[in-house]
Image (cartoon, coloured by chain):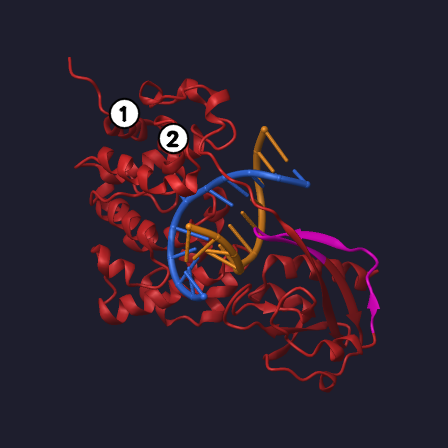
Chain colours: A red, B orange, C blue
Amino acid sequence: MSKIILSDAVINWYEKNHRKLPWRSATAEHYNPYYVLVSEFMLQQTVVKTVIPYFNKFVSKFYNIFILADADLDEVLSVWSGLGYYRRAKNLHETSKIICKKYNGIIPKGYDDLTSLPGIGDYTASAIMSIAFNYPSNVVDGNIERIFSRINKIDIPINKAKKKIRLIAKKHVPKSKVSFYVQGLMDIGATICKPKISKCFECPLENFCRVSNRDESINYPIKEKKIIKIRKGIFYCLIKNNNSIMLIKNRNKGLFANMDVLPSFGWEKEKYFEDEKLKNLEGYNLPNKFYYAFTHFKLEVSIVICKNFSKNELTGINKIEFVKFVDLEKKAIPSLIKKILDEVKKCILI
DNA sequence: AATGCGGGGCG
DNA sequence: CGCCCAGCATT
């Protein structure tokens, strides 16, 4: 009797237990590569549950790669609004245009072709090749890193162990059913071998694992923690006719690139306007401050409202636009700004 | 090799 | 409240 190998255990598990997701098909042979492309961009550093509604909205509006390539960036960003990491939206849009122009709309299957596209790195290229085209590439994401760091009980911090884990993962890649294999590993990582609580008792890989119990597995992979600093920002809501508010088109780099935002200062290096001009505006502070957490810093948000604001008090390099409150949902607004706008709407209605 | 880049959900 | 997530690009 031959011993079952890890990849077979994963594939067997996948065929019975995999999650039903909108970019997946019943058979590995019938994957829609465009769906895989879109989903992989959205899934970069973002959990499946968050992505699903955005994916459905995205592909119902941009239902193939040609429609996407022909769309305006602002349109793409407005569908992406709330999902975060907005550079991904621009990169996906750019990538779709290149694929239409250079590859006649056919998503390339080669690693070098894929990684040459904006927003596609080692992981995404490998994932597209394996998931959409069933090619045996070495796909290693956060889930798979976690699984192998537990299976092999890797006792060095994860940022220094990545190379070693890649080598381990590579040895397990099967020759067939790679699509089911990599997605199976990710599903196991997301539903069983989870970061905090792992359900080792129902794990198909228990026999392969050196830390197969919950108390030990929670310590892997080993991570070093970083210090989060606090910044303070003042955001200006400039209201006209009691029904519209001034938004500005953000710069095309850095935080909230190309998004529609409120003028603000105090928390970023780049300035929208001269601080003095904002400070001289007649307005009133909302009494309640709140905190908003980014990955690398925490922001204390203060809000100033200026009513009957006339635009010529401010001049800046950014494109200025007054948007009616009822039209805000069509704009490409990040969640932080949406939260501020919600506070302001409450005050204006009272 | 380290850092910037969102947002939500969960323990 | 801290941690984490189907990573990539830049420095």
Residue A335: percent from left, percent from top = 61, 57
Label 2: chain letter = A
Considering the numbered disc 2 on the image, is that residue within a helix, a strand or a loop? Answer: loop
Question: Can you see residue A19?
Answer: no
> Which residue in the protein does label 2 denote?
A154
* Residue range corresponding to the magenta coloring: A283-300
Residue A198: percent from left, percent from top = 47, 26
> Residue sitting at 57 percent across and 52 percent down?
A296
Label 1: chain letter = A
Q: Residues within 10 Å of mark 1 (few under 14, many from 20)?
A: some
Q: Quadrant of residue A147?
A: top left
Question: Can you see residue A273?
Answer: yes
Q: Quadrant of the N terminus of chain A?
A: top left
> Residue sitting at 17 percent across and 37 percent down?
A175
Q: Image height check: is A226 above or below A340? A: above
Residue A85: percent from left, percent from top = 50, 57
Q: Quadrant of residue A167?
A: top left
Residue A309 among magenta residues? no
Identify which amino acid the numbered label 1 is placed on: Ala
Q: Label 2, label 1: how many angstroms apart (C-alpha)?
A: 21 Å
> Residue sitting at 80 percent across and 64 percent down?
A348
Dot label at residue A9: 1
Dot label at residue A71: none
Identify which amino acid the numbered label 2 is placed on: Ile
A114 left or right of A191 in image? left
Considering the numbered disc 1 on the image, is that residue within a helix, a strand or a loop? Answer: helix
Give whichever of A152, C11 is nearer the camera.
C11
A126 left or right of A248 in image? left
Residue A266: percent from left, percent from top = 70, 67
